[in-house]
Amino acid sequence: MTTLLLGCIADDFTGATDLANNLVRAGMRVAQTIGVPTVPLQADVDAVVVALKSRTIAPADAVAQSLAALRWLQAQGAQQIYFKVCSTFDSTSQGNIGPVTDALMDALGCSFVAVTPAFPDNQRAVFKGHLFVGDLLLSDSGMRNHPLTPMTDANLVRVLQAQTQRKVGLVEHGVVARGAAAIADRMAQLQREGVGMAIVDAIRNDDLVQLGQALKGQALVTAGSGVAIGLPTNWGLVPSPAAAVLPPAGGLQAIVSGSCSVATNGQVAHARAAGVPVFEVDPLQVAAGADVAAQALAWARGRFQSGLPRGPVLITATADTTQLQAVQAQLGVARAGELVEHTLAAIGRGLVQLGVRQLVVAGGETSGAVVQALGISQLQIGAQIDPGVPWCAALSPAADAQVLHITLKSGNFGSADFFTKAFATLA
């Protein structure tokens, strides 16, 4: 049996590939599973990322799924557990970050865990316990209007304290800047003072490298993907380009976008301006009974068969805040989300059946729905397109035993030209 160095539990599918991407870049051989596997690990890897779709479900369900993932990872011999959360700390006062971390701590028998969503490469910094998205406090960013987890407080100590009975503390940047030994000493002091969880400041990559070293031997870490750049050195691993090699790419190209984040809205606008053909999914038409998935696939088939120069097509339900709120007012938040996810999942599967073998999916919930519809159980992690977003290779029953190249992009990630440059990096 392969002994895992690191066992990871991610609360959504795009976050899982984000984490796997950073681990690969730091020299780890990584497999990503979709859901908790039912068989022992077969691949010879250093780390496994179990991708769950637990970020916005009921806290009790998120805990149950996360504990199931933990048990499987422990059965594979994982030496350290990494609970991966979003770099914008997506959660509500009920969870799910606090409840899942509590449950993992209890199961592992540990009394202290460091927590940070910092990822400077993606403009996520934590200072004085406050999360910044670029130059803005989290509460002033587009996350303030997130349909499921509106983040109206940038003080992560306060956000996390609302989700746990354990005392939440802070490792300030003044300590972090002094290096791994100082971080470890401060964490030990906080633990003696009865603190169970501590937000850790980080404003640059070196802060995360030092934190990673300070976490050597810790049973659990709760973090975004940033800390991953500092963990592999604890096992003597160094970056290796060979870890990111994927099979050759071919086939048709498509983009499926469901995120309504500010970043994804900009990416859709950029692709449209660049001449990418666009089909817009209207949730109100879906709710009225129209077979919008069939309409979208018929449109895509026509584009693929038209003899026009080869390039991606974009099928999108992405909307700005005003449009999103109008739809939610008519359908309700939950129903609107479910209708869009179901429709985009059917479209994603249909595109692959039409011959798409290079597929970009935008949005965490959308990615989860599409991956499940495609029957993908494992991903091989390849090269990075933008920080936190790699190309992956997978097998899907819809792809007739051919390799499908797929990227699962968090709604908040990627440059404005992400949709157009993604395919260029794969060529």
Image (cartoon, grey):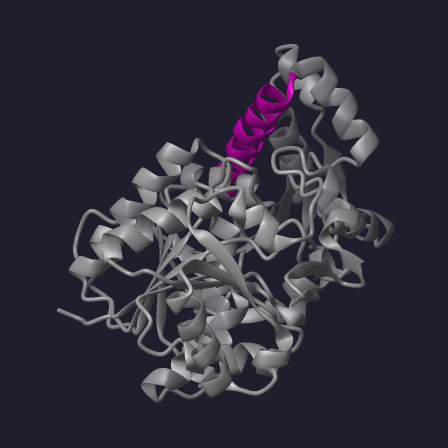
Q: Is residue 42 visible?
A: yes
Q: Is residue 284 above or below residue 120?
A: above
Q: Is residue 36 visible?
A: no
Magenta span of residues: 332-353
Q: Is residue 347 magenta?
A: yes
Q: Residue at x 73, y 17 (%)?
A: 329
| Residue 129 pos. (x, y %) | 63, 62
At x 44%, y 31%, the residue is 58
Asked if residue 240 lies left or right of residue 427, the reply is left
Main SS category, magenta section: helix
> Which residue is pictured at 28% across the width and 72% down the height?
45
Nearer the observer, 95 or 383: 95
- Relative to residue 406, is residue 72 drawn left or right? left
Q: Position of residue 242 (x, y in %)?
A: 43, 82
- Which residue ends up furthest to the front in the rendered image? 193
- The quadrant of the image that shows the C terminus is bottom right
Q: Quadrant of residue 231?
A: bottom left
For the N terminus, the image quarter is: bottom left
Residue in front for this viewpoint, 422 or 86: 86
- The spot of residue 198 in percent (x, y) is 49, 62
Q: Residue at x 49, y 42 (%)?
A: 163
Residue lying at the far right of the rendered structure: 273
Picture coordinates of residue 111, whole percent (x, y): 32, 60
**Which residue is at the front of the view, 296 or 13?**
13
Q: Quick check: is 269 in the magenta stretch? A: no
Question: How many numbered marks are there?
Answer: 0
Quarter of the image where one finds residue 363: top right
Residue 40 appears left or right of 16: left
| Image position of 78 with respect to 265: above or below | below
